[in-house]
Image: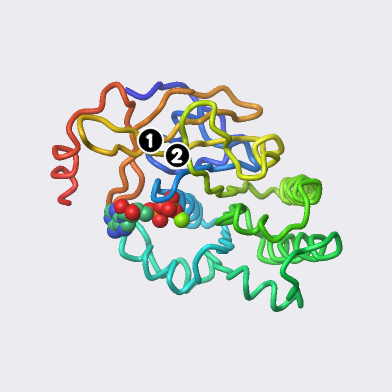
Amino acid sequence: MLPSTSYTRDRCVTGVHGLDEILRGGIPYGSTVLVAGTCGSGKTTLGMEFLVRGSMTGEACAHFTATEPSVKLLENIRQYPFFDMQLVDTGLINVFDMDVLYSWLGLTKATFELEDVHALIKAITDIVNTIGVTRLVIDSVTTLCYKIKSEQLIRDFLFTLGKKLSTLGCTTILIAEITSATQNAHWSSFGVEEAICDGIVVMGDAERMGHLIRFLQVVKMRGSGHSRAKYALELTPLGVMLTPMLKWGSVGDKSAQWGL
Ligand SMILES: Nc1ncnc2c1ncn2[C@@H]1O[C@H](COP(=O)(O)OP(=O)(O)O)[C@@H](O)[C@H]1O
Ligand SMILES: [Mg+2]
């Protein structure tokens, strides 16, 4: 059983099955959370579901995609029954291609310098401000940061962006690609993302009885108590489902339950 408590509503209730219980009610409003995971661990799906759940209660959401074109992203995500294209068509979920944004801003250089980084922060915060975005996902911050010249500039970018988004009342998920999610691994590529973010959620694979089981673990969440246990993560037609690892049984049984 997931822990049950009475929760206060000073939180952004993610709506992702199990996650709000792990976070004792949700993500503190205005936080920047790093979701660091290995390839195929479900980062993009989790990020999209976070936006779907918010938009279903009328919140304006934005997704900035840097790893795949928005057309491809939507084509993949719409295969899940939990995703409703109407949310995009009616402007509740706004998907932006980072490449298109760079072109708008005239950022054609291979690597960004201080003024480029400032232009990027302004463009993102202007969009958030204009649309009134309260949930934002950047997928991935790793791909974006590869374009920024130095570690110091990456630090400034993330710190300033996080501060401005928080002031605007926006709760942000920054997706990070990592190669290993084992203990003592780094939870970011540049080493600065994890120190600057308010929260860190790690996603990866664990081997159980010959199966690769996806897991999720909350490592840090400023301003909140939370479980630090590993949870098995399943990508189901209804969205992400989290179950305590210790209670995890056979994958086949669960899959049959969801008609997979
Ligand atoms: N419709 C679907 N139903 C269930 N699982 C899916 C579906 N589509 C993709 N997947 C699973 O999701 C994985 C990719 O998840 P994704 O969120 O894109 O991971 P990441 O962003 O961490 O690389 C695929 O490898 C596949 O196992
Ligand atoms: Mg992805």
Q: Amino acid at mark 2?
A: Met
Asked where in the image residue 254 lies, by quadrant, the reply is top left
What residue sits 19% from the left and 47% below the top? Answer: 258
Q: Which of 150 and 243 lies nearest the eye of the viewer?
A: 150
Which residue is painted at 15% across and 40% down in the image?
A: 252
Gap in angstroms between the C-alphas marked 2 and 1: 6 Å
Q: CB of residue at label 2: within 8 Å of ligand 1? A: yes
Look at mark 1 in the image and give the residue it sits on.
215
Q: How is the image coloured?
A: rainbow
Going by the numbered disc 1, the residue's amino acid type is: Phe
Classify 10 Å Cα crowding around label 1: few (below 14), some (14-19), many (20 and above): many
Relative image position of residue 205 (x, y in whole percent) = 36, 38
Answer whether labels 2 and 1 touch (C-beta < 8 Å): yes
59 w.r.t. 247: above or below? below
Counting residues from the start of the chain, the first of labels 2 and 1 encountered is: 2
Q: Quadrant of the N terminus?
A: top left
Residue 76 vs residue 146: left or right?
A: left
Relative to 128, is 97 above or below?
Answer: below
Q: Residue at x 70, y 40 (%)?
A: 192
Residue 142: image x %, image y %? 60, 52
Which residue lies under the disc numbered 2?
Answer: 203
Give the total of numbered labels. 2
